Amino acid sequence: MNAPTSFSHPRPLRHGQVSLVGAGPGDPDLLTLKALRRLGEADVVLYDLLVSDDILALINKRAEQLCVGKRASRHTLPQPDINQLIIDKARQGLRVVRLKGGDPFLFGRGGEEMETLAAAGITCEVIPGISAAMGAAAAAGIPLTHRDYAQGVSFVTGHRREGQQQLQWTSHTGAEETVVVYMGLGEAASIASQLLASGRTGDTPVAIIENATTARQRVVCCELATLGDTVRQHALKPPALLIIGEVVKLQGMLAQALAGSIDKGSNQAESASKAALAPVSTRLL
């Protein structure tokens, strides 16, 4: 029998070093072990609004905690000021954790911050987190790929830098592709209109997942043609993610499987799958 594999303990965060840490989608149980260690070592933690209170509670009590904001169109500090604050704290010899919802390198501006740190000569590391898309899809019971429904998946942002042109939605119109839209709730009606104009059909299934992986999670399913109206009718608020594509048809059945409510031998699974496209919200705890 093979001997158990031993894992070396990671090097501790050094003074004057920055750690870009992914906090995952919200559930503290989804935080990585390395991320948890860094929260215990940090002298200062600069965190985003999307980081849950349950995760903030895991930061060691001696660390300075600074909220630097960042949701779509809602910034406590502009990005250049955040960059400078990280540099200033590192140059003070502090162990700095930059804590971000999801994963730092997936619509988290981690690349921009790392560029700035490299230019300033400050050493840093990146600790990946479970992305919002992966966490939301798993918690809602929506596989992003499936051999019968989707052979590809795209991750896009509905929030563009000021002055930039709109996304070329014609690249995301294939029925065999799942599209996951970050920060798209406020532009949901416009996104639907552009996808329809680019060739997606009006009956394309859509799921809106609000507060994914937390006790406040809501999943609302509809068709692409009614997306804007559905967001308004259900008063959905950020943080929320849009999942667009045929895989959403599975949500009703698989969400019940997650909750352990499928009665084997019945046709409940099929009826639940068909019912999933009705614009009715479900709460998953």
Image: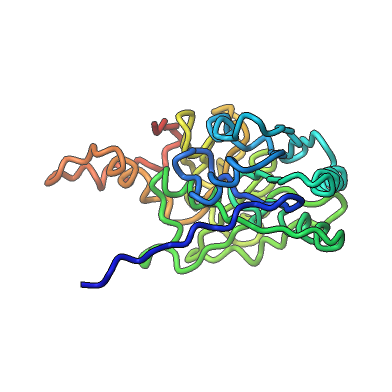
Q: Is residue 117 visible?
A: yes
- Tell me the quadrant of the picture where the C terminus can be found: top left
- Image check: 45 left or right of 272? right
Residue 188 in sight in this render: no
Residue 214 position, x and y percent, is 48, 34
- Please determine whether, in this image, residue 179 is positioned above or below residue 228: below
Residue placed at 49% from the left, 49% from the top?
Answer: 33
x 38%, y 47%: residue: 141
Give the farthest residue toward the bottom: 2
| Residue at the left extreme of this rendering | 265
Please name the residue shown 42% across and 43% down the image.
Answer: 140
Q: Position of residue 192 (x, y in %)?
A: 62, 49
> Residue at position x 59%, y 35% from top?
59
Q: Residue 247 placed where, x, y %?
A: 42, 55
Residue 61 pos. (x, y %):
62, 29
Q: How many numbered marks does the figure carry?
A: 0
Horizontal side of residue 72 vs 243, given as left or right: right
Q: Nearer the viewer, residue 280 or 226?
A: 280
On the rendered image, what quadrant is the N terminus found in? bottom left
**Residue closest to the eye, 141 or 215:** 215
- Classify 16 as above or below 1: above
Which colour style is shown? rainbow
